Image: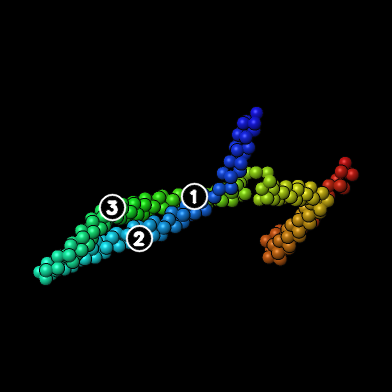
Amino acid sequence: MLQRLWQVIRSFFGRLIRGMEDPEMLLRQYIDDMRSKVPKLRAVVAEVLATEYQLRDQADQLRKKIADLDKQIISALKLGYEEEARVLIAAKNEAEESLQDTLDQLASAEKASQQARAALDDYQREMQRKIAEAQRLIGQAQMAKMQEELAHAMAAFNIGQPSDVLERMRAKVAERASRAKARVEVATTGVDSRLAEIRKATAQLGVEEQLLQYKRQLGMLPAGEPTAKEMQPLPEQTSQQS
C-alpha cells in the first residue's frame, strides 16, 4: 500500500514538473552549462601542461649539473685530488638517478598532457554538436509555440460558433431588416396606400384634360366633342339610376 501511494505521489509530482518545464529555457540552460565546463577543463589541462614543463626544466637542469660534475671530476683527477673526485662521482651518480626519475615522470606527464588535450578537443567537438542540436530544438520549440499561439488566436475567431459576436450581430441585423420590411408591407396596404392611388389617378386625369384642351386650341378635335370630364361616367349615379 505504501509503495503504491509513493508511486502515485511520484507520478503526480513528475507530471507537475513536466508541465512546468519550458523546453526553450531548459535547452538554453543546457547550453550554458556545457559552455561553463570548458574553462574548468582548460584549467585542468593547463595544470597538466605546467607539470610537464616543470619536469622538463628539471631534467634540463640535471643534465647540466651532470655535465658540470663530469668536468669537475676530470679536473680533480688531473690535479691529483682523488678524494674530491670520489665525492664528485657520488654526486654525479645521485644526479643521474634523479634525472632518470625525472625523465620517467616527464614521460608520464607528456602522456597525461596528450590525453588532457585530446579530452578537451573531444569535449569541445561534442559540445559543439550538442549545442547545434539544442539550437535546432530551440528553433522547433519556438515554432511550436508560435503555432500554438496562432491556433489559440484562430480558435478565438472560429466562424460558425453561436458565441461568435459577428455571427450573432449578422442574425440580429437580418431579423431587424425582416421586421422593417414586414412593417413597410403592412403600411402600404392600408389607407395611405389607397390615398396614394387616388392622388395618382387624379394627376393622370388632369394631364388628359390638359391634352384635350391643347388639341381643341389647335383644331385637332371636331367641334362639339365632349371633354374628358364629360366622357368619364359616374359609377355611383349609374348604379342609382339602374
Q: Marks 3 and 2: which is nearer the front?
A: 3
Q: What is the distance, in whole Å, between disc 1 and disc 3 at their CAs?
A: 48 Å
Where residue 161 sits, quadrant-wise, is top right
Q: Identify the residue under disc 2.
A: 46
Mark 1: secondary structure:
helix
Horizontal side of residue 112 vs 231, given as left or right: left
Q: Is residue 194 left or right of residue 107?
A: right
Q: Nearer the viewer, mark 1 or mark 2?
A: 2
Instruction: Identify the residue position indicated by label 1 in the image.
Output: 141
- Extreme residue in the bottom direction: 79
> Is disc 3 in contact with disc 2, using a CB cutoff of under 8 Å?
no
Q: Position of residue 242 (x, y in %)?
A: 88, 41
Q: Residue at x 69, y 62 (%)?
A: 215
Q: Circle 3: is it few (<14), some (14-19), or many (20+) Cα within 10 Å?
A: few
Residue occupying image coordinates x 26% and y 55%: 101
Mark 2 secondary-structure assignment: helix
The answer to whether residue 118 is seen in the rendering is: no
Total numbered labels:
3
Q: Report the front residue among 129 and 50.
A: 50
Disc on res. 108: 3
Q: Nearer the viewer, mark 1 or mark 3?
A: 3
Q: Amino acid at mark 3?
A: Ser
- Report helix, strand or loop for mark 3: helix
